[in-house]
Image (tube, rainbow, N blue to C red):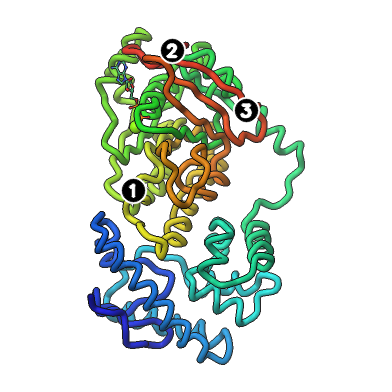
Amino acid sequence: MAKAVEIKNGGYFCAECNRTHIKGKIYKDHLKYAQDDDAEDVNIGEKDDEAEEEILEDDIEDYDDDQELIEAFDELEQLNEEEDLEEEIYASEDIEECIKAVKSLPGVGEATLNKLIKSGFNSLESIAYTPPNIIINDSGLGEKTTAKLIKASMERLGIGFKSAEDIWERRKNIARITTSSQELDDLLGSGIETGSVIEFFGEFRTGKTQICHQLCVNVQLPREQGGIEGNALYIDTEGTFRPERIIQMSEAKDLDYQKVLKNIVFGRAYNSDHQILLIKEAANIIKEKNIKLIIVDSLIGHFRSEYIGRGTLANRQQLINQHLHDLLRLCDIYPELAIVVTNQVQSKPDVFYGNPLRAAGGNVVAHGSTIRVYLRKGKGEQRVAKIVDSPSLPESEAVFAITEEGIKDG
Ligand code: ADP
Ligand code: MG
């Protein structure tokens, strides 16, 4: 394989895709390799990362001060623009601003900054939402320093102080959508609440997509029947949306299925970029189309298949985090909006996540979702739901059933 060589102002020239690269950005050409399941290609990605790290380590240490480093990145940005590479660059964050923010964290001197940047942690988000052990491994920073950096980054990104009264005012206005199962509704504290992101995670065929379909019907119901008289936006990343199921579920409730179908805005996301874009665009139609429920089924499937290998993990986590924050922001802006995302987990936990009850996506999804519901199979059509990590709900279980008419009590 061709090696990434030829140092240019803090970046490197990658013979693999014939481009000058900036550390911390993701390039389409490498994505092609990442998307290919072939083990050999995954190795190519990893070798590239090694080469990149080696070269940047030498290179970055040549810089006298941070300003020079920032200028070097600037130059590289310009260089890339001249080569008309803008479209090739996936993460469009302003690197200079991000680096400044990282540099302003308490205790970050030149050496720490360089270590962080060269291992791809060039923004507060990437530090706050990457598991500490990965930051430690990739950057070589110590445990204590890493913990401090994560804490400080989280504080910086976070949420300033509000009075509890403000929060209570907001929570009083929360509306709820029934799931059509009393037990599941009770488990969730009277149904799916607005103003939050609710994550259903579990193995294949545990009912995640069926719940999403049911909620698209139920959100349209009058309030006295458990709806909130709104429409749904369905982002399908796996191609599993079935209007037939909507028809069956509508007829079971004596609804005019044509009306119900009309009130579901559908978007098929073909890759993670497209998915991110659809959510950004969603903001423009929420008011206009009276959208009160957004479904993303599934949230991280594309990210998982596109970013393979350890070298890409920090970028993947950062993109998922940004995506999730786009969703959470929508909830903040539109308190009458409920957001439901799904997340597939395998029974065999993968290397990064020791606990099988942990959804794919690691810390990022755990921090971003407000309510997490783990689904597993029961007998026959029965399914068991369990609340995990909710700020206000007990960790209890509910049994429901998936039938031809939709979700019911088990
Ligand atoms: P996932 O968690 O993978 O998204 P689904 O939500 O697609 O799983 O659930 C699939 C399950 O839903 C099937 O195993 C089946 O039990 C049930 N199901 C799907 N369609 C119907 C139907 N028309 N009638 C009854 N059960 C159905
Ligand atoms: Mg599904």
User: Residue 80 location in percent, x, y?
Assistant: 33, 78
Relative horizontal placement of residue 297, taking residue 333 as reference (left or right): left
SS class, disc 2: strand
Compute the Cα span from label 2 to label 3: 21 Å
User: Residue 335 location in percent, x, y?
Assistant: 57, 35
Q: Answer with the quarter of the image where residue 254 lies.
A: top left
* Badge 3 amino acid: Glu
Checking the image for residue 395, the label placed there is 3
Instruction: Residue under label 1, please give it.
Output: 302
**Callout 3: few (<14), some (14-19), or many (20+) C-alpha neighbours within 10 Å?**
few
Q: Is residue 87 visible?
A: no
Compute the Cα span from label 3 to label 1: 30 Å
* Badge 2 amino acid: Lys
Compared to residue 335, the image places residue 179 above or below, namely above
Instruction: Residue under label 2, please give it.
Output: 408
**Callout 1: few (<14), some (14-19), or many (20+) C-alpha neighbours within 10 Å?**
some
User: Does the beta carbon at disc 3 come under 8 Å from ligand 1?
Assistant: no
SS class, disc 1: helix
Q: Which residue is drawn at 31% across and 79% down?
A: 4
Checking the image for residue 101, the label placed there is none
Q: Do the residues labelled 1 and 2 touch (CB within 8 Å)?
A: no
Relative horizontal placement of residue 381, taking residue 168 as reference (left or right): left
SS class, disc 3: loop
Q: Nearer the viewer, residue 292 or 245?
A: 245
User: Residue 144 location in percent, x, y?
Assistant: 69, 65
Count of numbered labels shown in the rendering: 3
Q: Which residue is drawn at 28% across and 79% down?
A: 3
Q: Earlier in the sequence, mark 2 or mark 3?
A: 3
* Badge 1 amino acid: His
* Quadrant in which ligand 2 is drawn: top left
Compute the Cα span from label 1 to label 2: 30 Å
Compared to residue 58, the image places residue 102 above or below, namely above
